[in-house]
Image (cartoon, grey):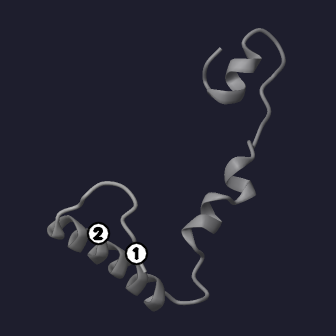
């Protein structure tokens, strides 16, 4: 069940939102069960972890977050 909790959507806006929700549900239902989910790939540790650590020295803190700087 979908409930509008704020605002007053037009019937066209509500129909468009429901079409998106239904299309997403249909895509998930037809996806193979052994396929990796996007959330799994997004939170994978090898994606988050750095391959190399910045060398200590001036600007090392900047290289931690912005590789190539400092």
- The residue located at (20%, 65%) in the rendering is 13
The residue that mark 2 highlights is 17
Marks 1/2: CA distance? 10 Å
The residue that mark 1 highlights is 2
**Of marks 1 and 2, the one in the foreground:** 1
Give left or right: position of 67 versus 45: left
Are dots 1 and 2 in contact, CB under 8 Å? yes
Residue 62: percent from left, percent from top? 68, 19
Q: Nearer the viewer, residue 49 or 37?
A: 37
Number of numbered labels in the structure image:
2
Q: Quadrant of residue 56?
A: top right
Label 1 element class: loop
The earlier-in-sequence mark between 1 and 2 is 1
Give left or right: position of 41 versus 61: left
Q: Nearer the viewer, residue 58 or 25?
A: 25
- The residue located at (17%, 63%) in the rendering is 10
Q: Quadrant of residue 39?
A: bottom right
Residue 24: percent from left, percent from top? 39, 77
Residue 26 drawn above or below residue 49: below
- The residue located at (61%, 59%) in the rendering is 42
Give left or right: position of 50 versus 30: right
Residue 34: percent from left, percent from top? 61, 87
User: In which quadrant will I find the N terminus?
Assistant: bottom left
Residue 49 drawn above or below residue 33: above
């Amino acid at each position: 069940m979908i409930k509008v909790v704020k605002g007053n959507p037009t019937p066209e806006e509500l129909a468009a939102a429901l079409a998106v929700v239904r299309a997403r549900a249909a895509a998930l239902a037809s996806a193979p069960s052994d396929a990796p989910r996007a959330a799994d790939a997004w939170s994978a540790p090898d994606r988050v972890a750095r391959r190399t650590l910045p060398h200590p020295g001036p600007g090392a803190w900047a290289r931690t977050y912005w590789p190539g700087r400092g």
